[in-house]
């Protein structure tokens, strides 16, 4: 993966990395991560896709199919704000899509398909963080301006909001077979019209 201290990761695809402890895709202390895809990364501790302390800028991120043994399958964020992130099909024991610690804020983002290891569909865990103006599968009882979305991607449940991704993966966490790797290659997390 990538380790930054005050640096910047821009317009990158961070794929298939492993960290023994934290930050499988990116481990960031300060700095910025923008216009970047973090896919199929894993961490033995926290932050399968991204682990960050005091992130100065995080925006326009795709965080998909990452895994963390402990918490923050998609991202583990302390003291920083991430805007316009799509966190989908990540897996962790706790806080599958995002773990937002003290001062961690997720804004104008999507959380869908993330799963905790025991099968729980909890999309995120807050430990002093906040989520604002975001769409969350199953909803979220904290923050403001958030919307509850269905786990159904096709809109087959009348009256429920749904995302309608162009081509979602059918599994959470890392790819474990050639078929799943091929599915990751075909995935398109843009919203269909």
Image: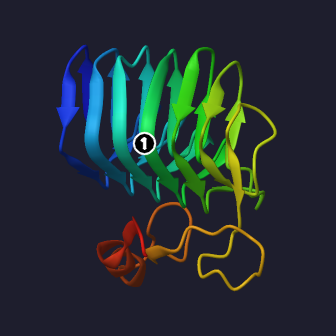
The answer to whether residue 188 is above or below residue 53 is: below
Residue 82 in picture, x, y percent from top left: 45, 31
Q: Residue at x 39, y 84 (%)?
A: 179
The answer to whether residue 120 is above or below residue 51 is: below
Q: Nearer the viewer, residue 34 or 180?
A: 34
Q: Nearer the viewer, residue 56 or 143?
A: 143
Image-based side of 101 in relation to 24, left or right: right
Residue 83 in picture, x, y percent from top left: 44, 35
The answer to whether residue 62 is above or below residue 161 is: above
Residue 25 in picture, x, y percent from top left: 34, 42
The answer to whether residue 47 is above or below residue 170 is: above
Q: In the picture, residue 24 is in which quadrant?
A: top left
Q: In the picture, residue 106 is in which quadrant?
A: top right
SS for tag 1?
strand
- In the picture of the structure, the residue carrying the numbered disc 1 is 84
Q: Nearer the viewer, residue 16 or 153?
A: 153
Image-based side of 37 in relation to 145, left or right: left
- Disc 1 packing (10 Å; few <14; some 14–19; many ≥20): some
Q: Residue at x 32, y 78 (%)?
A: 186
Q: Residue at x 54, y 55 (%)?
A: 90
Residue 96 in picture, x, y percent from top left: 63, 48
């Amino acid at each position: 993966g990538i380790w930054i201290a005050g640096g910047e990761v821009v317009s990158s695809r961070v794929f298939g990395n492993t960290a023994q402890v934290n930050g499988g895709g990116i481990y960031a202390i300060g700095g910025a991560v923008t216009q970047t895809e973090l896919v199929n990364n894993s961490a033995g501790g926290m932050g399968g896709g991204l682990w960050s302390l005091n992130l100065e800028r995080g925006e326009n991120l795709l965080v998909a199919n990452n895994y963390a043994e402990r918490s923050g399958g998609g991202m583990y964020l302390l003291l920083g704000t991430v805007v316009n992130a799509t966190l989908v099909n990540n897996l962790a024991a706790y806080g599958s899509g995002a773990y937002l610690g003290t001062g961690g804020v997720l804004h104008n983002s999507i959380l869908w398909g993330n799963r905790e290891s025991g099968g729980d569909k909890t999309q995120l865990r807050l430990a002093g963080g906040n989520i604002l103006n975001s769409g969350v599968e199953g909803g979220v009882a904290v923050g403001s301006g958030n919307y509850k979305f269905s786990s159904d991607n096709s809109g087959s449940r009348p009256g429920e909001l749904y995302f309608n991704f162009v081509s979602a993966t059918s599994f959470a966490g890392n790819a474990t077979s050639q078929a799943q790797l091929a599915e990751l290659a075909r995935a398109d997390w843009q919203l269909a019209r």
